[in-house]
Amino acid sequence: MILIMLGAPGTGKGTVAGILSKKLGIPQVSTGDIFRKNISEKTELGKLAESYISKGALVPDDVTVKLVEDRLNQEDAQAGVILDGFPRTTAQAEALDKILENINKKVDMTINLTTPEEEIIERIVNRRICPKCKSVYNLVLNPTKKEGICDKCGAELTARADDNEETIKSRLETYFEQTSPLVNYYEEKGKLFSATVSKTINKMGVDVANDVLKKLEGE
Ligand code: AP5
């Protein structure tokens, strides 16, 4: 099964993908996480990715497509994956279609998350992540029991380098210019499932994940 998480920064793609990954038993493949791991390990890919990510721009398509193609060929991806943050351009979406065609797979569903823009910035500046087990928290909306410490593994939480207000604005611009056309791309293919994820109507992505599971079961 191939699922795609689409949506502006901070809409909760990673949160919903994490829930779905556990429920469906298939890996969450976050291109952002792969780039951040390479940045922390100071690899060549990491140095290249950092020069784009720090400005809120996209890493070039050829680099990103190759990365995802290699990941899809790995053993644990054979039953399916949840692509979190890929594709992000029309060129990436077209490349993905070709890659999947070559391995006799197809996109089963694209989950498009929307969140009121004023909420997005509040969410991102308050996001904290666990560098060890990758759990995502929010200082306001989803705080840990003990301040600054991961509930699940006890590691000290950190903030992402690109989670500052200036970079968030560029990331949003990049999303609207380069990624939002993919909503139509997948809608025209009849693969789109859209959900509004707002703190007022949603329990940290659990409702959305449950709706997706029902839809996949054909309910
Ligand atoms: P990436 O890591 O993919 O970041 P992003 O798209 O900017 O998305 P975020 O991770 O910020 O947010 P999210 O939607 O996952 O939300 P989350 O669940 O964390 O990419 C980073 C960078 O890498 C890009 O800018 C680009 O440079 C590069 N890159 C990545 N992929 C690329 C590609 N394909 N091509 C080229 N470049 C690429 O939630 C956010 C916060 O809200 C959290 O604090 C969470 O606790 C809270 N929250 C979540 N759900 C809810 C809810 N329902 N109610 C209230 N709060 C909630």
Image: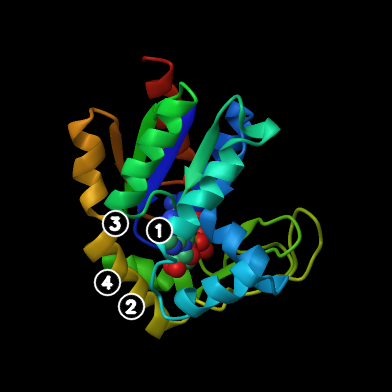
| Quadrant of the image containing the C terminus | top left
Residue that numbered label 1 is attached to: 61
- What amino acid is labelled 3 in the image? Thr
Callout 2 touching callout 3 (CB < 8 Å) = no
Give the mark, 4 or 3, whose residue is nearer the N terminus: 4
Query: Could you say whether the residue bearing mark 3 is in a helix, strand or loop?
Result: helix
Is the CB of the residue bearing disc 3 within 8 angstroms of ligand 1? no
In this rendering, position of residue 144 left or right of residue 196: right
Decide: few, some or many residues near mark 2? Use Cα within 10 Å; few <14, some 14-19, many ≥20: some
- What amino acid is labelled 1 in the image? Asp
Residue 162 appears at what percent x and percent y? 50, 76
**Residue 127's quadrant in the figure?**
bottom right
| Direction bottom: furthest residue | 166
Is the CB of the residue bearing disc 1 within 8 angstroms of ligand 1? yes
Q: Is residue 141 visible?
A: no
Q: In this rendered view, identify the residue nearer to me: 104 or 209.
A: 104
Which numbered mark, 3 or 1, is in the foreground of this view?
1
